[in-house]
Image (cartoon, helix red, strand yellow):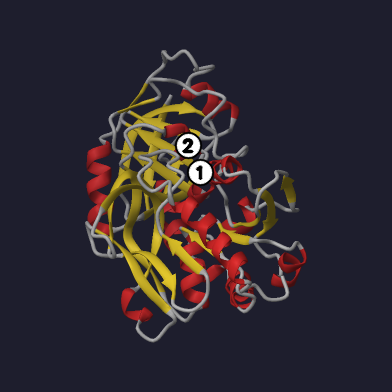
Amino acid sequence: MKRYLILEDGTIFNGLAFGSNRESSGEVVFTTSMTGYQEVLTDPSYCDQIITFTYPLVGNYGINRSDYESIRPAASGIIVNEHAEFPNHHEGIQSLSSWLTAKDIPGLYGIDTRKLTRKIRQHGTLKGRLSNTIENAKEIIEEMNASPLKTDQVSKVSTKSPYHLPNSGNRVVVVDFGVKTGMLRELSRRLCDVIVVPYNTPAADIIRLQPDGVLLSNGPGDPKDVPEGITMIQELLSYNIPILGICLGHQLLALACGGNTEKLKFGHRGSNHPVRDLKTGKIALTSQNHGYAVTEDSLMNTTLELTHQAVNDGTVEGLKHKVKPAFSIQYHPEASPGPQDSNPIFDDFMNMIKTTKKEGLMQNA
């Protein structure tokens, strides 16, 4: 069956359909990840986005039981040059196309994904629609140009009620802005007693859980659309509870401390982004998925200092609070998917908790 990608600038790509038969709209982005398509498609940070894979063949090892980053995928669609109809892997249980059908996610293949990626790089991310017809293309384009992007992604993907992952170690409260399973797995590997709470949980409710540390998770969209999170972080900082912010959590920490964020032209999405540690000079390859970044100039009069920077474009990749036990990173240290260069970030968080406990710095927690 034919399927079309209609972009807000009037461009139309003609291809073929796979996955769900429904039509969908979203922000069209691209990822440079060569593997890990299951983790990408189930990452809540892709909520309401149509994901273009620059790697030409996707789906060759199928879908397995292990590589989910969330139970309910939030992506609006997938675009590939070619998808594997008959995958081959000992852990694979179904094809990508059959999985997309089951999850009601539409796919488009057979288009020039290089041309689409170049367009996004030149013009920035674009609103688009995966449509089964182009008879009403003019109306679709007019509607996209008249409608702003959605701003409720975090409320869509965050848990609606707290849940507990019991263990015997440090108690870590995870504020779920769109948390990935991989981050919870890394905390569990370190024997953390994890409690996951909704994104709009007041700081007082978090304090009542008596946490040893708080992790501000990744998530979709513009951090300025989550004012509840900014207020909550400002209040948590007064208790001297160790805080680790990841991706959206990193941006929210910056906003809570007086910094600013801006939308990037086409974002950072992939598993090979080099990041420099400004203290050691070492460079790590990182997994990233974000469309917004902290502006370096806005940090000048704040209590935050720059610790990590992107090699490719110099954007802010890591921050540390000058007074409070809090730090953050823009990339994904759990490497789902991607290299594991940055996995020790979780150990740094555990050491911060240990030090804070030893020095008795936490107040009223």
Which residue occupies the foreground of this view, 26 or 181? 181
- Quarter of the image for residue 22 reads top right
Q: Quadrant of the C terminus?
A: bottom right
Residue found 43% across the figure and 28% down from its top: 17
Contact? badges 2 and 1 (CB < 8 Å): yes
Q: Which mark is drawn over residue 89?
A: none
Tell me if 129 is positioned left or right of 166 in this view.
left
Amino acid type, mark 2 = Glu
Q: How many marks?
A: 2
Query: Which residue is situated farthest in the bottom direction here?
Result: 301
Amino acid type, mark 1 = Asp
Which residue occupies the foreground of this view, 135 or 289? 289
Q: Residue under label 1, please give it.
A: 43
Which residue occupies the foreground of this view, 320 or 309? 320
- Rendered location of residue 23, percent (x, y): 51, 39
- In three-dimensional space, the C-alpha distance between marks 2 and 1, rounded to whole angstroms, equals 6 Å
Tell me if 140 is positioned left or right of 68 in this view.
left
Residue found 60% across the figure and 66% down from its top: 358
- Rendered location of residue 204, percent (x, y): 74, 72
SS for callout 1: loop
Tell me if 319 is positioned left or right of 111 in this view.
right
- Residue 68 in sight in this render: yes
Q: Quadrant of the N terminus?
A: top left
- Residue 219 in sight in this render: no
- Rendered location of residue 240, percent (x, y): 60, 74
SS for callout 2: helix
Q: Residue under label 2, please give it.
A: 39
Q: Is residue 74 above or below residue 265?
A: above
